[in-house]
Image: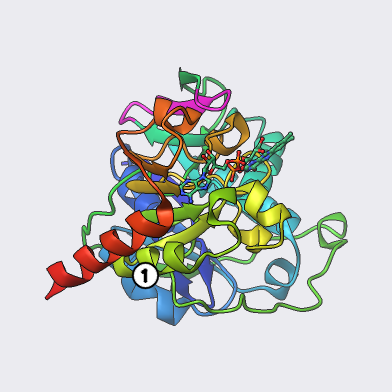
């Protein structure tokens, strides 16, 4: 069976959920081989094994891990050359997409970014033009390189050996031109990562700067908090939480938009969510055109009631 290379997305060995999704997808068309760059492999090994990585290529060289994306692309290109994999799967975040693009050039292969589904025959589904079209595409040249959005698959355990092998790529001087000088961990909120969360609760201008009810509702659901650009531009919430064309793209199981009108640039970042709910006091708000469930009402009344009901149901 061909190998499928899966680039592991992790922080010091804490494997992100997206990687377990990629391993699950990879098993449809080959044997997943994880590619682990940096330190912390011991912490990652069990998760990689649990979700079906038969092999792990461990790249610990500082020539790769102390630099930005270019050395990782070179290392992957060398692994592609060596293993002739059925495909390379990479998480669809800014870093992943840059690595994928560089890898595509280096290997002369086709690249598909932001897939929301990958079928067993490697046909991918993308949602484009702010979700107005769904595109099915397939790489026809070289090794298919595919970046996959978070929450595109449900991670399924399939225990495997995760037999690790140290891999020492040859990294060019050009690829080492930019070096990481400092890494600062993100401020911990206790909430899940916005792009990986199964539930996202967002607030817009309708919050009038008070995100309290939005955060309380999010916490009752174990959700991440998002914000519209209007809320971010007003300084009410950090840009890191902005959802939309110039913010993050999310695709959770459930997206709850509160006091958000539903502008096209906001939709671009959330309309592939599986179930969409909106709370808005204007029944004509465009967001209601795309929701599965809509509540016409004041978020300052609706959200505390919903939060209380959820807390009660927990007993
Ligand atoms: P508004 O459009 O002002 O809507 C507020 C809504 O809240 C209204 O529908 C109102 O009825 C409702 N409301 C008010 N009070 C209450 C209440 N008490 N209870 C319930 N509902 C209430 N926007 C993004 O979000 N993300 C982006 O990444 C983004 N990128 C952009 C890029 C470009 C190039 C441009 C030009 C714009 C971009 N925008 C983006 C901005 C976008 O066009 C909208 O201006 C923005 O999304 C509006 O935010 P909003 O829905 O919170 O505010």
Near mark 1 (Cα within 10 A), the count class, few <14, some 14-19 or many ≥20, is some
Query: Compared with residue 252, is residue 191 higher up or lower down, i.e. above or below?
Result: below
Residues shaded magenta: 119-131
User: Residue 53: where, in percent of width, then height?
Assistant: 34, 59
Query: Compared with residue 279, is residue 238 higher up or lower down, i.e. above or below?
Result: below
Which residue corresponds to the image point at 61% horizontal and 53% vertical from the top-left? 242
Which residue corresponds to the image point at 61% horizontal and 75% vertical from the top-left? 186
Which residue corresponds to the image point at 41% horizontal and 25% vertical from the top-left? 289
Nearest to the observer: residue 196 or residue 59: 196
Q: Which of the 4 image quarters holds residue 117? A: top left
> Is residue 40 found left or right of 177 in the rendered image?
left
Q: Which of the 4 image quarters holds residue 269? A: top right
Main SS, magenta residues: loop
Nearest to the observer: residue 68 or residue 262: 262
Q: Quadrant of the C terminus?
A: bottom left
User: Residue 276: where, in percent of width, then height?
Assistant: 36, 40
The number of numbered discs placed on residues in the rendered structure image is 1
Which residue is the site of mark 1?
Answer: 219
């Amino acid at each position: 069976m061909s190998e499928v290379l899966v680039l592991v997305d992790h922080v010091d060995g804490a494997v992100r959920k997206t990687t377990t999704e990629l391993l699950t997808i990879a098993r449809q068309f080959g044997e997943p081989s994880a590619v682990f760059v940096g330190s912390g492999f011991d912490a990652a090994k069990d998760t990689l094994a649990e979700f079906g990585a038969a092999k792990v290529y461990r790249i610990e060289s500082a020539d790769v891990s102390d630099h930005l994306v270019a050395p990782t692309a070179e290392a992957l290109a060398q692994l592609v050359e060596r293993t002739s994999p059925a495909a390379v799967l990479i998480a669809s975040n800014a870093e992943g997409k840059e690595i994928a693009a560089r890898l595509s050039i280096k290997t002369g292969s086709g690249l598909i970014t932001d897939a929301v589904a990958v079928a067993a025959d490697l046909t991918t589904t993308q949602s484009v033009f702010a979700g107005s079209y769904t595109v099915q595409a397939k790489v026809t040249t070289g090794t298919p390189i595919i970046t996959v959005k978070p929450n595109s698959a449900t991670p399924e355990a399939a225990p495997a050996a995760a037999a690790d092998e140290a891999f020492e790529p040859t990294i060019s001087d050009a690829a080492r031109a930019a070096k990481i000088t400092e890494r600062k961990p993100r401020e911990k909120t206790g909430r899940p990562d916005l792009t990986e969360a199964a539930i996202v609760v967002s607030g817009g201008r309708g919050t009038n700067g008070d995100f309290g009810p939005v955060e309380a509702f999010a916490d009752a659901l174990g959700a991440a908090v998002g914000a519209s650009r209007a809320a971010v531009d007003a300084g009410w919430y950090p840009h890191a939480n902005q959802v939309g064309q110039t913010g993050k793209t999310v695709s959770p199981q459930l997206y709850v938009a509160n006091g958000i009108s539903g502008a096209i640039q906001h939709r671009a970042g959330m309309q592939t969510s599986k179930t969409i709910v909106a709370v808005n006091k204007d029944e004509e708000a465009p967001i209601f055109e795309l929701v599965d469930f809509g509540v016409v009402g004041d978020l300052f009344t609706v959200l505390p009631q919903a939060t209380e009901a959820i807390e009660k149901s927990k007993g």
